[in-house]
Amino acid sequence: MSVKSNISRWIAASVNKHFDDRKETNYLHIDGMIRQTNSIPNYTELKIDGPYFVELSRNIFNLIVEVNVYLQTQQNESDMYASRRMLGIVHKAFTRCIPVYAYGDGPEDTGALVGVLKILQEFRQKEVESHFGQTKPSENITQSQVEGHYEMDLEMDNS
């Protein structure tokens, strides 16, 4: 099995499934899907950067993955905490570990457990919340983001 040629896809598929399973009632747009958010006032959007590879020793790699969930909320005078409720759901999805499985429909996509992403603790917190507020004065929309970083050590051929 060629782990290195598949690991990026397996990580993305596993992280996507992990966050989709924990979205509760929020609409989750996953990067790569056809965008259907134009008519949805409140939604979340998942983006994954990485993996970044650091070779620790021969064929042993440390992989770093950055996970960002962007939130867009329509401002509503009757519920000024809607965005905070959505943020709470997103924070719960940033669990300590995300199992990585060989998901897909190719011959090497067996569904087997490949490894486990573990959240990195930065500044004594596991994820960082950012509030951008109302980015366009002409629109009653607020935006925010939750970002977390995960790592996994993995043995794989360097070819």
Image: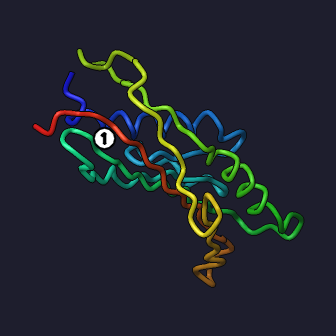
x and y percentages locating residue 139 in the rendered image: 63, 76
Q: Identify the element where label 1 is drawn.
A: helix
- Please name the colour scheme applied to the rendered image: rainbow
Say whether residue 22 is left or right of residue 103: right
x and y percentages locating residue 36 in the rendered image: 50, 47
Which of the image's four quarters has the N terminus? top left
Q: Residue at point 33% right, 37% down?
A: 154
The picture quadrant where one finds residue 49 is bottom left
Which of the image's four quarters has the C terminus? top left
Q: Residue at point 83% right, 65% down?
A: 81
Query: Outermost residue toward the right?
Result: 78
Query: Outermost residue toward the front?
Result: 57
Q: Amino acid at mark 1?
A: Ser
Say whether residue 102 is left or right of residue 143: left
Which of 3/92 is in front?
A: 3
Q: Residues within 10 Å of mark 1 (few under 14, many from 20)?
A: some
Say whether residue 22 is left or right of residue 107: right
Which of 33/52 is in front?
A: 52
User: What residue is pinned by disc 1?
Assistant: 8
Is residue 36 shown above or below 134? above
Q: Number of marks in the image?
A: 1
